[in-house]
Amino acid sequence: MKKRLLGRTVVLLSSLLLLTNTTYAQETEEIVLDSGNIAWMLTSSALVLMMTAPGLALFYGGLVRKKNILSVMMQCVFLMGMMTVVWGVCGYSFAFGGENPYVGNFDHLFLKGVMPSAELSMDASVDGMIFAVFQGMFFIITPALICGAFAERMKFSTMCVYSLLWGIFVYCPIAHWVWADSGWLCEWNEKASFPALDFAGGTVVHISSGMSALVCSILIGKRLGFGQEPMPPHNLTYTCIGAALLWVGWFGFNAGSALAANALAVNAFVATHMAAAAGVVAWSVAEWIQHGRPSVLGGCSGAVAGLVCITPAAGAVNPMQGILLGLAAGYVCFLACTKLKNTFGYDDSLDAFGVHGVGGTLGALLVGVFATKDITGERYGWLEGNAWQMVNQSVSILAAAALGIVGSFIILKVLDAVMGLRVTQDEELQGLDLTQHGEEGYIFL
């Protein structure tokens, strides 16, 4: 009885100490070698990988016509393979190597200095390997998000080369700016020119991919018959399942970015869930008012919009503020995917720009408004008296958007001249499943 009472007392005191410590600032130097932290980070890495396939593969796959479902799934699966290899060979080094504030270097080519070696023991390499594999999952899903913009019409071979070049020349520099300790936008770098808050990838993942997606949709051109014939999603059941998997996987995406099983991860987890829930409500209500009924597609899109918006802010706002971000994202992204797209007439097939570009930008701005010292310990936003943080956020948004737009434009123009961007009209009419992969998604005997 005494031992049980003593144990409860120790747990209570430990909890009180944790609650009185409101400084949740992220430690970037290393992951503490604790079995709980290791388990959480490995789980988070797996959750983020699940977001690409089956999550994104089903979400996007259900939205295209049935003659193109395998092409979307193959894009996701192949990028899981190719981008992983590229990350291990050079991507991690380009994103996190060196001390230059603008570009990485060759220090970690082939994961040198990360894997166990004669100079680095197995135990000493664990934190490096965990960080590398966790960040590698982000490198996989980001170009996969762009695929939604050119779905049903881009050559598979060109998509592969574009994703490879985009990952090296667009993603890696932005990741270095924002997350490398020496980056000029890194919030933990005392010498950073414009330290911006981006906890889990508002600029690095969503703005970069969303802006690139817009360029892709414009340069590649509209699908045949776009605007003249209906192109409804062929299987919203897949889309709903994919959205649910994305929602669950996003806990690894955001809460895992705390790099430990700690109080910051808990806050990020809860704020992420609240934002997704609010996004569902906002988009569904907006659709209900405008069209007289809410749709499954709208609810799923709202959830993803809320998740995108909270991504940069999950480590800087509390759960109630997360609801505000989710509500804002659900409504603003609804407008972007309906009124904005209809006004300008671009064919962003699966709304990669409308959700990720717009939602990521909104989240990167709102974290500059709502960031609180109760969570960050140091950096705070406009509402707590630091209006300059809005300048930092704006600069990071413009920088990520500029590189995404210019980088994608150059890469696409070069590839168009060398290998062509788009399948032929006959191939597009027949469907990419058969013409690009020689398979059919549905065979009914």
Image (cartoon, grey):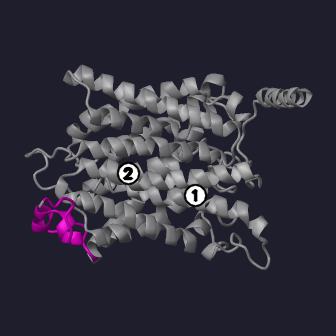
| Of the pair 59 and 99, the residue shown nearer to us | 59
Q: Looking at the figure, which quarter contains the C terminus?
A: bottom left
Q: Position of residue 213 (x, y in %)?
A: 34, 53
Q: Which mark is on residue 56?
A: 2
Q: Position of residue 352 (x, y in %)?
A: 34, 47
- Label 1 or label 2, whichever comes before in sequence order: 2
| Of the pair 209 and 240, the residue shown nearer to us | 240
Q: Element at badge 2?
A: helix
Residue drawn at x 37%, y 25% is: 282
Residue drawn at x 57%, y 32% is: 270
Type of the residue with mark 1 = Gln
Q: Which mark is on residue 127?
A: none
Q: Residues within 10 Å of mark 1 (few under 14, many from 20)?
A: many
Residue drawn at x 51%, y 29% is: 274
Q: Element at badge 1?
A: helix
Residue drawn at x 56%, y 56% is: 175
Q: Residues within 10 Å of mark 2 (few under 14, many from 20)?
A: many
Mark nearest the camera among 1 and 2 is 2
Most distant residue in the front direction: 1
Q: Position of residue 261 (x, y in %)?
A: 69, 44
Examine the structure image and report whether residue 86 is included in the region drawn in magenta.
no
Q: Looking at the figure, which quarter contains the N terminus?
A: top right
Left-right relation of 14 to 367: right
Q: Which residues are magenta?
A: 419-444
Q: Which mark is on residue 135?
A: 1
Examine the structure image and report whether residue 422 is included in the region drawn in magenta.
yes
Res. 111 in view = yes
Q: Position of residue 323 (x, y in %)?
A: 50, 25
Type of the residue with mark 2 = Leu
